[in-house]
């Protein structure tokens, strides 16, 4: 006597379940992709507008959140120039493309991603190693133009090769690093102490 299999063991039932779950998860993936794109778009939430390069950027510890938060302060234009949002976007994008083209991630990290041979660049604009706020732009420019002559090894003996950047690329990289320093990275890197800002 032939007995029929229970409904939950039928091949057709599991085929339909697989199709439904695959379609449902594809929909979830699409929704998460749009949500992620909205969250990482400049000017939305934790990612500042490109024109933030016209302002002083600092970090303050937030006791309620238990982490340091970016503080956008007074107007202190980069290179003494106040950039419109469009001009700032073009300059930051030039810097981002230069960092990619010169394969900086082969040695450095951004947001913890990349190689660990050289320092993380997430908060490079606020690195206390630049000495003071007034000299920072000049020192960064000199370093990027000739990193061999202006080596900053901090006792490691490691030297950055000369990426042979144009003046425009140097300005773009500095703008990109300033913009990156204003991104709310949820406390990363932990324990980072920024360069004193505004004479503080």
Image: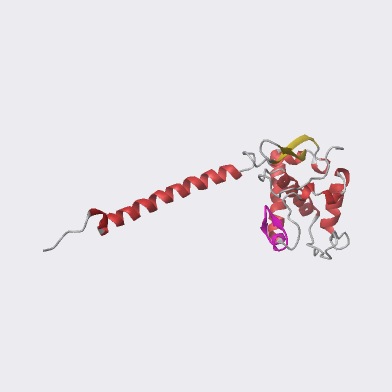
Task: List x then y, in percent, for residue 136.
Answer: 85, 47
Magenta-colored span: 104-115
Left or right, 199 with reference to 123: right
Quarter that holds the N terminus:
bottom left
Rendered residue at 35%/51% (across/down): 20
Residue under the image location 37 percent in, 52 percent down: 21
Picture residue at 78% right of the left edge, 48% below the top: 125
Q: Is residue 142 above or below residue 81?
A: below
15 or 160: nearer the eye?
15
Residue reaching furthest left? 1
- Say which quarter of the image contains residue 142: bottom right
Looking at this view, is 187 or 118 the one in front?
Answer: 187
Write down the quadrant of residue 163 in the picture. bottom right
Q: Is residue 31 magenta?
A: no
Tell me how many marks there are: 0
User: In the displayed structure, would residue 36 be above or below residue 144?
Assistant: above
């Amino acid at each position: 006597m032939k007995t029929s299999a229970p409904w939950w063991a039928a091949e057709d039932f599991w085929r339909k379940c697989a199709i439904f779950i695959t379609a449902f998860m594809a929909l979830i993936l699409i929704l998460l992709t749009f949500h992620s794109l909205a969250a990482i778009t400049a000017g939305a939430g934790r990612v500042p507008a490109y024109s933030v390069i016209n302002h002083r950027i600092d970090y303050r510890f937030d006791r309620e959140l238990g982490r340091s938060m970016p503080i956008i302060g007074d107007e202190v234009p980069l290179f003494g120039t106040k950039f419109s949002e469009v001009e700032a976007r073009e300059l930051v994008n030039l810097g981002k493309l230069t960092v990619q083209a010169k394969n900086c991630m082969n040695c450095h990290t951004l947001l913890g991603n990349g190689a660990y041979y050289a320092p993380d660049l997430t908060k490079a604009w606020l690195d206390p190693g630049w000495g003071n706020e007034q000299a920072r732009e000049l020192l960064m420019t000199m370093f990027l133009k000739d990193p061999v002559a202006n080596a900053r090894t901090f006792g490691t003996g490691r030297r950055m090769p000369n990426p042979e950047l144009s003046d425009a690329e140097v300005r773009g990289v500095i703008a990109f690093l300033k913009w990156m320093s204003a991104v709310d990275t949820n406390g990363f890197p932990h324990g980072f102490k920024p360069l004193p800002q505004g004479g503080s």
